Image (cartoon, coloured by chain):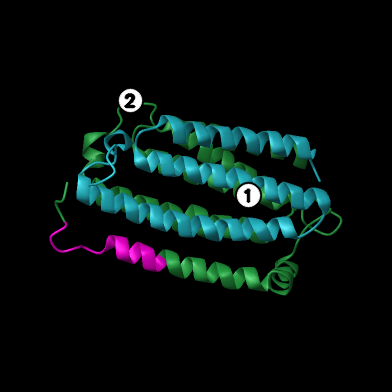
Amino acid sequence: MIVPLGHVLLFAGLLFVAGLAAVLLRRNLIMILIGVEIMLNAVGLVLVGASAYWRHPSGQLFALLLMAVAAAEISIALALVVYLKRSRGTIDVNRFDGMKG
Amino acid sequence: MATLLFYILAAIVLMAVLLCLTRNNPVHAVLYLVHALFGLALLYFLLGAPMLAAWQVILYAGAIMVLFLFVIMLIDPDLFEKKASRGRFRWLPVGFLSGALLACGGVLIMMDPLAAGGIVRYRLSPRAFGRALFDEYGLAVEILSLILLFAAVGAFHLGRRHKGKEDAS
C-alpha cells in the first residue's frame, strides 16, 4: 500500500461530500445524476483502497459489481429524465411537486 | 514517487469534480466528469487494480458518459448556441486538467509500478481477477446480469412513446 488507508478514506470522503452537495443543492436533474455518479465512484475508491490494504481481491470484485449496478441505475434514471422532459417539458426538480401528473 | 503521484492525482480529481459540479452547462459538467473518472482510473492502477482501471475507462468514462451526452443532446438540442461560454481563457482549466492527467499517465507508464518487484506490492492481475470473480462470486455475476436485463427492459419501456399520453401535463 503506497499511502495510508486513512488518506484514501479522507479523499473518498471528500468526493462523496462533493457529490452529496451536488445532489442536495443543484436543481437540474442531470446535475443531480452526475452527483450520484460521483458518490458511487467515491465508494468504489474506498473498496479498491480496502482491497489494497487487506491484500484481498474481494474489494476489487465488489468495485466491479458496483460499476455494473451504477450502469443499470443510470440507464433507468436517464430514461426517466427523457420521459419527464417529454411529459412535463422541464427537468427542474423544483417543478416536480405534484403526486399525480 | 508513487506516493507523490497518488496525491497529485487526488488533487487533480478533486479539482475536476469541483469544476464539474459548479458548471451551469451540463455538457461542460460531463466533460469535466470524464477527467475526474480518468484520474480515478489511474488511482485504481496505482492501488494495484489494473483490470478495474481498464473497466473504469471503458465503462464509466466511455459508455456511461456517452449516455449522459446522448440524453443531454436529446432533451436540449440548442444548448451550445444558448450557453456558449465567452472569454479568452475558457480553455485553460480543461487544458490544464488534460495535460496533467496525460503527464501522470506517462509517468505511470515509465515507472511501471505494477512490475514484479515494483513499489506496489499487492496487485491483482486480470487472470487472478477473473478467477476470483467467477469462482467466488459466480452467483453475484448471474444476479447482476439479471439486474442489467431489467434495466434494459425498464429503459425501453420508459422510452416508448405512449399514444395519447404525450401531453398529459
Chain that is coloured green in the picture: B
Left or right relative to A30: residue B74? left
* Chain to which the residue tagged by mark 1 belongs: A
Q: Secondary structure at mark 1?
A: helix
Residue span colored magenta: B152-165
**Within 10 Å of the Cα at label 2, are there few (<14), some (14-19), or many (20+) other Cα atoms?**
few
Res A25 → quadrant: top left
Percent across and percent down for residue A62 are: 66, 58
**Within 10 Å of the Cα at label 1, are there few (<14), some (14-19), or many (20+) other Cα atoms?**
many
Q: Secondary structure at mark 2?
A: loop
Count of marks placed on residues: 2
> Could you tell me which residue is drawn at 64 percent across and 35 percent down?
A13
**Residue with the mark numbered 2:** B87
Image depth: mark 1 or mark 2 in front: 1
Chain that is coloured cyan in the picture: A
> Could you tell me which residue is drawn at 58 percent across and 73 percent down?
B142
> Could you tell me which residue is drawn at 24 percent across and 45 percent down?
B76
Left or right relative to B57: residue B127? right
Percent across and percent down for residue B22 are: 43, 30
* Chain to which the residue tagged by mark 2 belongs: B
Is residue B48 visible in the rendered image? The answer is yes
Res B13 → quadrant: top right
Answer whether residue B47 is magenta in the image.
Answer: no
What's the residue type where badge 1 is placed? Gly
Q: Which mark is residue A29?
A: none
Percent across and percent down for residue B61 are: 50, 52
Q: CA distance from mark 1 to mark 2?
A: 37 Å
Is residue B105 visible in the rendered image? The answer is no
**Residue with the mark numbered 1:** A44
Answer whether residue B154 is magenta in the image.
Answer: yes
Foreground: B140 or B132? B140
What's the residue type where badge 2 is placed? Gly
